[in-house]
Image (spheres, grey):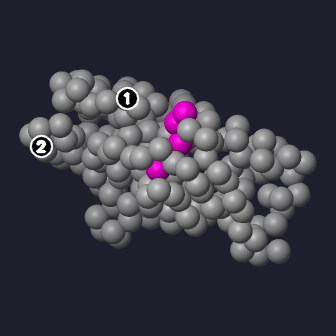
Amino acid sequence: MFFGRFLGGNSFEQTYRCYPSSFIDKPNLEAGAKIIMPPSALDRLAFLHIQYPMLFELHNDATNRISHCGVLEFVAEEGTIYMPYWMMQNMLLQEGDVVRVKNATLPKGTYVKLQPHTSDFLDISNPKAILETTLRNFSCLTTGDSIMVAYNNKKYYIDIIETKPASAISIIETDCEVDFAPPKSL
């Protein structure tokens, strides 16, 4: 089933059924915040002359949850997108739920404040290096999201509690000051 509308001007807005990355053979997708979209999306985005990097605002209208992401590839079946499972959880989406995808232009980030869910993330020998490596797989960050950092076969969840200069920022080719709040649980 394909839902959608293309808006005039330089706007892309399309509704898709979403599925976790486990449905396709892309294990690296889980380690970042990028989605896989169908080829028709690339055709439309190219026609609209959408600037790189391509960033998107995701809407779960059923729960009023919004997040942002980049795109990894355009190889999904028409009418579907694939996203990391942790992103689906963050947006309160189940397999096959409808998600609205719009192109977005985000300011370059200058500041982000993070809060690990548990103190064991801080017990890693070099949490800053692990975080920097993980964030290379992200194009943007959204205040209110919880991101997943995988290290040594363990998953660590970290809340994005503040971003500047806006509530959603691009972290591509930018120096961003990072601050940590105390973990939620010790």
Which span is picked out in magenta?
169-173
Q: Say which residue appears at 23% left-offset and 26% top-offset.
A: 49
The residue lying at 53 percent from left, 59 percent from top is 163
Label 2, on which residue? 7
Residue in the picture at 52% in, 36% down: 172
SS of the residue under disc 1: loop
Q: Position of residue 41 (x, y in %)?
A: 26, 32
> Where's residue 148, x and y in %?
64, 52
- Mark 2 to mark 1: distance in Å? 19 Å
**Residue 88 seen by the camera:** no
Q: What amino acid is labelled 1 in the image?
A: Tyr
Q: Which mark is residue 52?
A: 1
Q: Is residue 171 left or right of residue 51?
A: right
Callout 1: few (<14), some (14-19), or many (20+) C-alpha neighbours within 10 Å?
A: few
Q: Of 97 and 138, which appears nearest the observer?
A: 138
Question: Which of pointers 2 and 1 lies earlier in the amino acid sequence?
Answer: 2
Q: Position of residue 167 (x, y in %)?
A: 44, 60
